[in-house]
């Protein structure tokens, strides 16, 4: 069996990272947050994607704006976060990222060669979401171990890309415990999953937004 730390994390069609092999879904323990809390609502919205978003698809897609999305049966890691905020709180990250990029385009990565914002793709790129969240004041220190995370935290990480570099990944911290850290809700291969994988790759960012 291939260790998932060495699996290839692609950047197909301009979407950054988020690709890999699935692991078993973690659904044995019961959630322990009060259902009325914002974090619980966010996690519940992400959890509803498990079994619905069944595959990873990084192809560029022209989206409606605002409120655009690809069909729910597919997506990338960023879509888990985007859909969770939209379903839980009615927050349209597509529109917010686009508005912020129009205000401060130079603050965002220029690695894709764009000269202006593209509402079909900008919000679906991990580096752009990290910049947006930091500019929104959501960045928090990265815990020294798995014990410092809270349900509803957003993490970014840098999985190995299989060719000597790193990819980019993003997901939500669950309210279910794992062996060393909380479970996470993400899509890193074959659809949305809830699994014990937070510390499988180097963590590059921690954010807590609207929860």
Image (cartoon, rainbow, N blue to C red):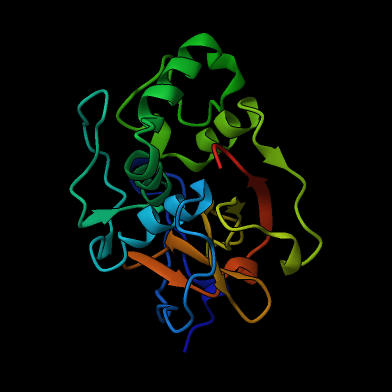
Residue 108 lies left or right of residue 195; in this view the side is right
In the rendered view, tell whether residue 8 sits above or below residue 208.
below
Q: Position of residue 20 (x, y in %)?
A: 43, 67
Residue drawn at 42 percent across, 63 percent down: 188
Q: Position of residue 53 (x, y in %)?
A: 26, 60
In the rendered view, tell whether residue 156 sits above or below residue 26.
above
In the rendered view, tell whether residue 73 sits above or below residue 112.
below
Quadrant of res 50: bottom left
Residue 164 lies left or right of residue 126; in this view the side is right
Residue 109 lies left or right of residue 44; in this view the side is right
Q: Position of residue 125 (x, y in %)?
A: 45, 39
Quadrant of res 90: top left
Q: Position of residue 17 (x, y in %)?
A: 46, 52
Numbered label tally:
0
Residue farthest along the top direction in this orientation: 103
**Quadrant where the image shows the C terminus:** top right
Residue farthest along the bottom direction in this orientation: 1
Residue drawn at 61 percent across, 61 percent down: 164
In the rendered view, tell whether residue 154 sits above or below residue 133.
below
Residue drawn at 30 percent across, 59 percent down: 49
Residue drawn at 36 percent across, 30 percent down: 92
């Amino acid at each position: 069996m291939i260790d998932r730390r060495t699996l290839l994390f692609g950047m197909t069609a301009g979407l950054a990272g988020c690709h890999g092999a699935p692991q078993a879904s973690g659904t044995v323990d019961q959630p322990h947050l009060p259902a009325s809390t914002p974090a619980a609502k966010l996690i519940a919205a992400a959890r509803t994607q498990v079994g619905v978003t069944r595959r990873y698809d990084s192809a560029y897609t022209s989206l409606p704006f605002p409120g655009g999305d690809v069909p729910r049966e597919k997506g990338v890691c960023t879509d888990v976060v985007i859909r969770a905020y939209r379903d839980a709180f009615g927050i349209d990250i597509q529109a917010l990222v686009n508005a912020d990029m129009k205000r401060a385009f130079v603050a965002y990565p220029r690695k894709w060669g764009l000269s202006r914002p593209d509402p079909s793709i900008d919000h679906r790129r991990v580096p752009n979401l990290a910049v947006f969240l930091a500019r929104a004041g959501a960045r928090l220190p990265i815990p020294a171990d798995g014990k410092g995370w809270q349900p509803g935290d957003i993490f970014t990480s840098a999985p190995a890309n299989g060719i000597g570099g790193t990819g980019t990944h993003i997901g939500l911290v669950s309210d279910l415990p794992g062996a060393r850290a909380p479970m996470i809700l993400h899509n890193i291969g074959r659809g949305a999953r809830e699994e014990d994988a937070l510390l499988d790759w180097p963590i590059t960012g921690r954010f807590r937004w609207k929860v």
